[in-house]
Image (cartoon, helix red, strand yellow):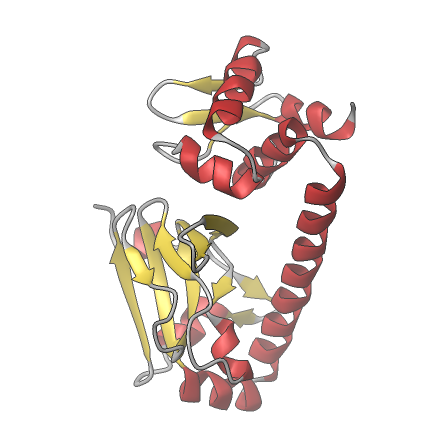
């Protein structure tokens, strides 16, 4: 396993270095490496802290009283999650687990409230994240209302790769569970399998231990 320092991605807002700030917070903050497919918290657990992804990927999932599951978010390095506790949410509204080897920072609720008041740069960064998250939720809703499941799958795959660079292949995650993709897209596993095979035959994705997505997949999203 790589060292924590070696896996970190520098995240800055102007002269404010978030990772240096987190490392200097002391009590109320902790950072640890987590393996893939490990639960971080479960729906219904006490909401008592905020998490920040230094590296890796995290899935947010909700379960209905009838046992039906739905993926409501796939997060990457630079994202916060669990922020509902700051608005008085007593229990977690979703479950969170790692999709890949990840480095996560956890900030206690009281500590997060305090540092948001004391550090304007952190407050601005956190506010910008929340606004961006809200925009993403609105885009997801429009996607589900008006786009086909094929286009929704293409969008999810592109989001996982952050779109990449033209002409290059970007690794998504070591193993993509099609059940997870089906829950995220809002369709059946058989439909996901059909579209994944179609994308592969068209040369838009590759699968050989890792899923790789070509930026040309964007054409599926932009065109009927």
Residue 65 or residue 185, whichever sits in front:
65
Question: Residue 189: in sight, yes or no?
Answer: yes
8 over 148 or under it: above or below: below
In the image, residue 132 lies at what x, y percent?
Answer: 67, 60
In the image, residue 217 lies at what x, y percent?
Answer: 64, 24
Q: Quadrant of residue 61?
A: bottom left
What residue occupies the far front of the structure in this picture? 66
Look at 78% across and 23% down and name the residue there: 224
Q: Is residue 15 left or right of residue 38?
A: right
Q: Quadrant of residue 177?
A: top left
Look at 47% across and 57% down and name the residue there: 10
Look at 43% across and 39% down and name the residue there: 180
In the image, residue 43 lies at what x, y percent?
Answer: 39, 65
Look at 63% across and 68% down and name the residue there: 130
Q: Quadrant of residue 65?
A: bottom left
Question: Residue 164: in sight, yes or no?
Answer: no
């Amino acid at each position: 396993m790589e060292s924590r320092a070696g896996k970190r991605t520098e995240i800055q807002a102007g002269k404010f270095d978030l990772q240096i700030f987190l490392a200097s917070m002391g009590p109320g903050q902790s950072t640890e490496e987590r393996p893939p497919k490990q639960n971080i918290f479960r729906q219904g657990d006490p909401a008592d802290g905020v998490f920040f992804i230094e590296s890796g990927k995290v899935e947010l999932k909700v379960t209905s009283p009838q046992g039906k599951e739905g993926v409501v978010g796939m997060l990457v390095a630079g994202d916060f999650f669990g922020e509902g506790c700051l608005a008085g949410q007593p229990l977690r509204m979703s479950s969170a687990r790692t999709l890949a080897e990840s480095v996560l920072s956890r900030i206690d609720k009281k500590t997060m409230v305090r540092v948001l008041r004391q550090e304007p740069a952190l407050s601005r960064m956190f506010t910008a994240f929340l606004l961006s998250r809200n925009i993403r939720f609105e885009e997801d809703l429009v996607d589900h209302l008006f786009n086909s499941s094929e286009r929704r799958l293409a969008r999810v795959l592109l989001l996982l790769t952050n779109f990449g660079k033209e002409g290059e292949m970007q690794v998504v995650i070591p193993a993509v569970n099609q059940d997870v993709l089906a829950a995220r897209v809002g369709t059946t596993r058989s439909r996901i399998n059909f579209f994944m095979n179609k994308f592969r035959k068209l040369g838009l994705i590759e699968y050989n231990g890792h899923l790789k997505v070509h930026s040309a997949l964007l054409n599926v999203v932009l065109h009927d």
